[in-house]
Each structure stands twice: as structure tokens, then as C-alpha cells.
């Protein structure tokens, strides 16, 4: 079994359930804010945000990133509707929020650098949004850390009088990992446990010699990671596990998650049912046509318009494809309004899977169990991609978002239609191959142009790939190698085509005009504290 770069849960791929418009730049940064609040010990009295480069630095207003970070710092979660108005809430609480952007920085462009004040003390907390809502906390007051939000335990800053052996004796085998970081003659210990430390644990630490500061750690995710290694890291390895354990593909997905997070099959399926319910709700919200989008660059009822055309028999693609595309667009319109969606695998691609899967499930009168199996097949396909490639448009282009969503959707459709595990894998590969090189070129910054309608293209591609796979057509390049090709293409894609609003559609005269208009609105929002 090969080692993986990072642990990935099924619910990192189908999830989080979140307020839009961006999984990386809204839900992810909100989680960074939540951890900042945790380390600070409560609500900040002043907030200073630093952004770097051409990702968050250019899009933090259009993606509501600043508002989302503040929402997390104020104690709200990813699916809270207050994400859109958190800056006003901070002003109401007399918490000032200021910004600094270094556009020419070489730092990771998805970095959130927070300088927080509370009760006369200041704390610097830094994190990176990885993609799809996942995060990695990297620094606290100059110390290097590595936290993803699922950890329990504590951080301990010490001086030379501290005795680590005494600490380990105090916890008597309850520490699952201990890491040490040095900065300017100071030491920070990252001490992880199976559960959050008790008040008694914290009091015992405070009485130890050499302890300068204690930061309790509490998981902000609704699951823990119990296994440091994945059950499998490729389709080929998954197929071997399936053969050895006599598992179906959905069963293999649940076995994988059980090894990762300790969740039971029943809990995994229950969570998938909740995801399915939110997906259907997001379609209904968007298909109404009453969509108050963050920027409002485009009409608010594109999904509803297409659905009417389908019902009136005016479309050339037939009812099934037209309905699926209309629902995908409607879901993305819900997302663009900063309403509740499921990242699948990202918010910018959240319409592809629900649009296609709800339509085909209805046509086939699929049972709830069959739909959950399809979702599991989509999720594990996304997991295998995420182990080796980015799911963020600002890192890997739109091939990382719409491309992966389309591939996951093809896998789900093949599973729902009764395809074999091999056909599921090749459906994924065929869809992924078709969208290699797709750039991320948002107009002005908000997740509207071309993101909303691009979800419809993801649906059409998924249908084509699924039909080919079900007919026995296979990818000449094996599925695992196609994932490698995606990672390779992401590395070669220039920064101008990765969410920076410089290349592609972002270079057009209309886009430049809209960007200027949006910048004027941003200045007005900043002036008014919005």
C-alpha cells in the first residue's frame, strides 16, 4: 500500500454542507476563522486580515471570504445564513475589521493570515484553504503547526524549565501524537489525544513549570481521523481490496471511511441521506427563479428558464438532459445567492452531481439505498482524485472543480444504472479526460460567470461518459493514470488561468468592464462595512 500526501474523507468530497458561494474561499476560510476563535479563547475584540497574491487577494469580496472568516471568528458554522452579513454583525458588536493585501507576495495565494486581539493580548493565526472546504492551519504566533480541524488535544508553549517527560507521565498514554516546533528560542508542543482534554487536564498543565501558554484543541469537524493510512489510494488498490474482502464498490467506500474516521456503515449512509436531502432542497430554491446573487451580473432565473423550455418541448437534447442541466444551473444559482448547498466536491461545481443524479434517479424510480450507493461511488472516486490532485480552481484550474465533479457524476450515474465497478472507474476516467485543461477564469471575482453555466457542461459530459462506460467503452489510459494526468496538467497550467481573473474570459472587454464596476462596489461595501 502506498502512502498518501493527506487524509481524505468521503465527507471532504461530498461536503461540507455550507453557505455559498465558494467551498475554498467561503466554507474553508470560515473554518480557519473558527480555529482562530478557538486558539484565541473566545470572540476577538479586533480583527486584522492579511491576504496574499492573486487568489484570495483578488476574490475575497466576491467570494464573501472576509465575511466568512469573521463569521467563524464570531462563532458561526459553515451552513449559517449569517455568512453574507457577518461584517455587519461584527460592526454591531463593535468589533473592527481591517484588511491588508500583498498582491506581489510569493506566499500560497489561499493563505488567511489573522491578527486577533482579545483582553489586551494579540495572537497571529495562519491557515491555508486547501480546496473543497478542507483547510490546513500552518502557524500560530510564529510557530509552525499542521492542523486540519479534526484534532483534539492542546498546544503548549514552553520555556527551558519545561519537562516533557513529566507531561507525558501526567497523561499516561493518552497522547496519540506529540510534535515539537521551535521559534526564537521558544518551543511549541502539539499534543494530540483521542478526545478533548478535560478541565482537570488543563489545570494540571497550568501548574507545570515552564508552561507559558496553553491552547486547547477541539475538533471543528463532525468526525475524527483514527487511521494514519488509507485502506487504499488508487482504483487498482480498491479493486484488490474489493476482491479480497468480497465487497461491492459502495461497500468498499464505506470500509474506507470506517478505517479513516471510525464511522459505522449506518452513520455513513445516514449522512449521505442528509447530503441528498440538502441537494434536492438547493435545486428547489434555485429553480424558483428568485435568486438574489452576490453580484447579480447575470439574470437570476437561468435554471428556471431552461426548465420551462424543457417542459414546453423546445430543447434539442430531450427531457432528461435538459432537466439535469436546468437543475445543475439552479443549484449553482442557489450557491451564488449565499444559500445552503453541498460542495460536490466544491461549491463552484455543486450543481453537476445533484442535477444529473436527481433526474436519472427519478426516471428510474431508484430507491433511496440505490441513490446512496451512487453517492458513495461518486465520493470514493473524488477521494482517489483528491489524494493526488487539487480540488481548488485557484490551484488547479476549473478542471479541478467542474472536471472532477463531472467525473464523480459519471461514476454515480454508472453505479445507479447497474454498471460494474470497472465501468464506474472508466466512466470517471472518460469524463475526466474530456475536461483536462479546463481553466478557471471567473469574471470580476464572484462565482457567477462562467461558473454557473459551466456546471451544465459538466452534466452533459458526465452523461456522455456514463453512456460510453455502460456500453463497454473504456479509457485507453487507465483511470489511475488519468488522475495522474490531471495532476500533471494542474502543475503546468499558468497562474493567469487559475482563478486570477487575468486570462481567458477574464481578459475580455466585457469582463474588464464588469471588474471595474465590481471594484467600485467593493470600495463602497468596504466603506459601509459590508
Image (cartoon, rainbow, N blue to C red):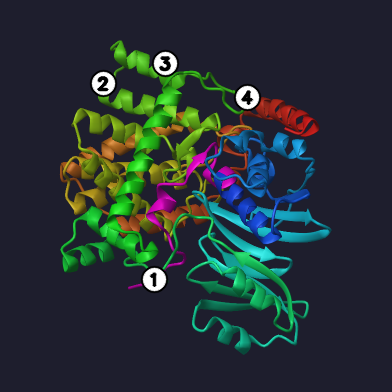
Q: Is residue 476 above or below residue 340?
A: below
Q: Nearer the viewer, residue 76 or 17?
A: 76
Mark-to-mark CA distance, 4 and 1: 49 Å
Mark-to-mark CA distance, 1 and 2: 46 Å
Q: Residues within 10 Å of mark 4 (few under 14, many from 20)?
A: few
Q: Which is more N-terminal, label 2 or label 1?
A: 1
Q: Is residue 494 above or below residue 137?
A: above
Most distant residue in the top direction: 312
Q: Is residue 184 above or below residue 9?
A: below
Q: Using the rendered image of the protein, determine whether residue 320 is visible from the camera's viewpoint.
A: yes
> Which range of residues does the magenta coloring cover?
1-26
Q: Residue at x 36, y 63 (%)?
A: 262
Q: Which is more N-terminal, label 3 or label 1?
A: 1
Q: Residues within 10 Å of mark 2 (few under 14, many from 20)?
A: few
Q: Which corner quadrant of the image does residue 414 belong to?
A: top left
Q: Residue at x 67, y 46 (%)?
A: 74
Regarding mark 3 in the picture, which secondary structure is present there?
Answer: helix
> Is residue 7 toward the left or the right of residue 168 in the image?
left
Regarding mark 1 in the picture, which secondary structure is present there?
Answer: loop
> Is residue 408 toward the left or the right of residue 368 in the image?
right
Q: Residues within 10 Å of mark 1 (few under 14, many from 20)?
A: some
Q: Which residue is denoted by mark 4 in the rendering?
A: 510
Q: Which residue is denoted by mark 2 in the rendering?
A: 318
Q: Which residue is denoted by mark 1 in the rendering?
A: 229
Mark-to-mark CA distance, 4 and 3: 24 Å
Q: Which is more N-terminal, label 1 or label 4?
A: 1
Mark-to-mark CA distance, 1 and 3: 48 Å
x, y (%) of residue 522?
73, 32
Q: Are marks 4 and 1 in contact (CB under 8 Å)?
A: no
Mark 4 or 3: in front is 3
Q: Which residue is denoted by mark 3 in the rendering?
A: 305
Mark 1 or 2: in front is 1
Amino acid at each position: 500500500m502506498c502512502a498518501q500526501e493527506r487524509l481524505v474523507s468521503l465527507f471532504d468530497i461530498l461536503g461540507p454542507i455550507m453557505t455559498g458561494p465558494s467551498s475554498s474561499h467561503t466554507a474553508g476560510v470560515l473554518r480557519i476563522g473558527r480555529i482562530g476563535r478557538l486558539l484565541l479563547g473566545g470572540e476577538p475584540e479586533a480583527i486584522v486580515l492579511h491576504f496574499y497574491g492573486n487568489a484570495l487577494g483578488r476574490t475575497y469580496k466576491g467570494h464573501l471570504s472576509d465575511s466568512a472568516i469573521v463569521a467563524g471568528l464570531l462563532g458561526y458554522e459553515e451552513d449559517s445564513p449569517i455568512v453574507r452579513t457577518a461584517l455587519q454583525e461584527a460592526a454591531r458588536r463593535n468589533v473592527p475589521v481591517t484588511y491588508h493585501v500583498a498582491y506581489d507576495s510569493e506566499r500560497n495565494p489561499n493563505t488567511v493570515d489573522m491578527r486577533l486581539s482579545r483582553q489586551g493580548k494579540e495572537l497571529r493565526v495562519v491557515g491555508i484553504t486547501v480546496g473543497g472546504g478542507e483547510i490546513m492551519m500552518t502557524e500560530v504566533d510564529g510557530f509552525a503547526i499542521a492542523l486540519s480541524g479534526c484534532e483534539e488535544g492542546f498546544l503548549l508553549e514552553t520555556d527551558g524549565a519545561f519537562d516533557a517527560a513529566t507531561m507525558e507521565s501526567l497523561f499516561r498514554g493518552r497522547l496519540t501524537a506529540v510534535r515539537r516546533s521551535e521559534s526564537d528560542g521558544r518551543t511549541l508542543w502539539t499534543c494530540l489525544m483521542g478526545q478533548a482534554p478535560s478541565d482537570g487536564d488543563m489545570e494540571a498543565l497550568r501548574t507545570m513549570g515552564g508552561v507559558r501558554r496553553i491552547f486547547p484543541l477541539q475538533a471543528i469537524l463532525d468526525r475524527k481521523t483514527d487511521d494514519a493510512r488509507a485502506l487504499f489510494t488508487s482504483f487498482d488498490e480498491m479493486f484488490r481490496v474489493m476482491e479480497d474482502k468480497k465487497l461491492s464498490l459502495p461497500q468498499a467506500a464505506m470500509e474506507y471511511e470506517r478505517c479513516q474516521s471510525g464511522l459505522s456503515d449506518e452513520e455513513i449512509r445516514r449522512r449521505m441521506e442528509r447530503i441528498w436531502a440538502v441537494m434536492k432542497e438547493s435545486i428547489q430554491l434555485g429553480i424558483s427563479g428568485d435568486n438574489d446573487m452576490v453580484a447579480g451580473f447575470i439574470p437570476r432565473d437561468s435554471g428556471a428558464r431552461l426548465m420551462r423550455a424543457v417542459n414546453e418541448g423546445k430543447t434539442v437534447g430531450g427531457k432528461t438532459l435538459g432537466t439535469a442541466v436546468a437543475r445543475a444551473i439552479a443549484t449553482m444559482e442557489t450557491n451564488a445567492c449565499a444559500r445552503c448547498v453541498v460542495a460536490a466536491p466544491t461549491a463552484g461545481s455543486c450543481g453537476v452531481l445533484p442535477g444529473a443524479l436527481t433526474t436519472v434517479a427519478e426516471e428510474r424510480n431508484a430507491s433511496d439505498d440505490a441513490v446512496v450507493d451512487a453517492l458513495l461511488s461518486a465520493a470514493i472516486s473524488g477521494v482517489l482524485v483528491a489524494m493526488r490532485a487539487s480540488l481548488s480552481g485557484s490551484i488547479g484550474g476549473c478542471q479541478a472543480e467542474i472536471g472532477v465533479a463531472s467525473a464523480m457524476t459519471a461514476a454515480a450515474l454508472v453505479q445507479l444504472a447497474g454498471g460494474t465497478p470497472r465501468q464506474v472507474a472508466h466512466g470517471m476516467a472518460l469524463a475526466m479526460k474530456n475536461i483536462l485543461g479546463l481553466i478557471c477564469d471567473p469574471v470580476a471575482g464572484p462565482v457567477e460567470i462562467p461558473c454557473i453555466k459551466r456546471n451544465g457542461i459538466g452534466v452533459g459530459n458526465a452523461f456522455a461518459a456514463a453512456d460510453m462506460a455502460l456500453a463497454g467503452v473504456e479509457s485507453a489510459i487507465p483511470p489511475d493514470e488519468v488522475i495522474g494526468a490531471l495532476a500533471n496538467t494542474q502543475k503546468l497550467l499558468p497562474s493567469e488561468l487559475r482563478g486570477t481573473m487575468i486570462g481567458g474570459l477574464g481578459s475580455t472587454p466585457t469582463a474588464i468592464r464588469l471588474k471595474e464596476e465590481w471594484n467600485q462596489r467593493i470600495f463602497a461595501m468596504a466603506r459601509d462595512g459590508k
